[in-house]
Image: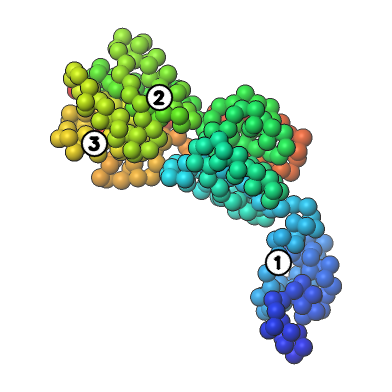
Amino acid sequence: MPDDIEQETRQRPPTIRDVAELAGVSKSLVSLVLRASPKVSDKSRVAVEEAIEELGYRPSAMARSLVNRHSGVGGIITSNAKDVFHADVVDGVSSYINEHAPGLVPLILHGNHEEEGEKLASRRFMEMRAEWLMFMGSALPDATLESLGRETPTALIGRWLESDSIDIVVNDDRAGAAMATKHLLDLGHRRIAHITGGRGNGARAREASFRRTMQEAGCESTVVEGTYLQQGGAEGARQLLGASGPLPTAIFAANDLAAIGAIDVLKRAGHRVPDDVSVVGYDDIPIAALAPIDLTTINQPARQMGQTAARLLCARRNNGSLKGQRVLLEPKLIVRSTTRAI
């Protein structure tokens, strides 16, 4: 490295001018290399890359965004920061972007399943000129989501919405709940209770499907309110334990975390799972398969949902004329050791 460049760069971070001088090329050619332009010769590309490595040069994302009018930011808004399912969705988003849109940086803000929290998060992303928005579940009104969808490419995961301006990616909650309930009915259970997911997206569809499946089987439905958290499942189990009449022989919880919370309460009360009470969850989060839990559940393809939403959004990012699409993914029953025949 020439002495004057070395002396100067010791005092400050290296710039694109330093790279150009060291490589013996113009600043515009360095810019072409940074953009992976095919117009650069192999010899020049190698010279620039070696200069970047030697100087430790790091391009400024902010500066690039000012020049090309693209922020490089993809905004992800979760409704529940504690939900393991959402982490799997983000993993799917990241895997797609790393392979197909490496220049895009997905950032995450949490709305905490509150309308105001999600409005604040979306506003912050819009101020950052996010190139798309992705909601994992949402407490926002339909009209607010539609408005965002008309302003920037937007996807909604886990909540159904009739829209031509938003990409919708959901699993078939009704089919999944029917699978869970029919599995318990096939094992001979008739006293089956459902712990709901409260206000969670898809919770009411799962509850309605449970009630319908029980009715078609000629059985009464027992439903107690819960949430998509362990505490919600635990509270639902306490309601069932405190109710008059016999304890249900099986429980279908709205998701895996609720199922785990219910199992904990049942075991602490002296009830064996599945010998006394069979339990089914929903989502098939990674811990559901661990030996101490080994939960029978409904697989909702979280990673695939994230990949699908990212693919749709990146397509609309590159072609703003595309309309929003609706994708319905099929769930699967995963049988483990928390259910048995009676």
Three-letter code for the amino acid on which mark 3 is drawn? Val
**Disc number placed over residue 308 in the picture, else none:** none
x 64%, y 31%: residue: 144
* Position of 303 relative to 44 (above/below): above
Residue underneath mark 2: 177
Nearest to the observer: residue 155 or residue 330: 155
Residue underneath mark 1: 59
Q: Secondary structure at mark 3?
A: helix
Q: Colour scheme in the image?
A: rainbow
Q: Secondary structure at mark 2?
A: helix
Cα–Cα span, label 2 and label 3: 23 Å
Cα–Cα span, label 1 and label 2: 50 Å
Residue underneath mark 3: 265
Residue 205 in the image, given as x and y percentages of width and height: 46, 22
Nearest to the observer: residue 333 or residue 6: 6
Residue 318 in the image, given as x and y percentages of width and height: 74, 43
* Position of 94 relative to 283 (above/below): below
> Of circles 3 and 1, which is in front?
3
Residue 315 lies left or right of residue 139; in this view the side is: right
x 65%, y 43%: residue: 123
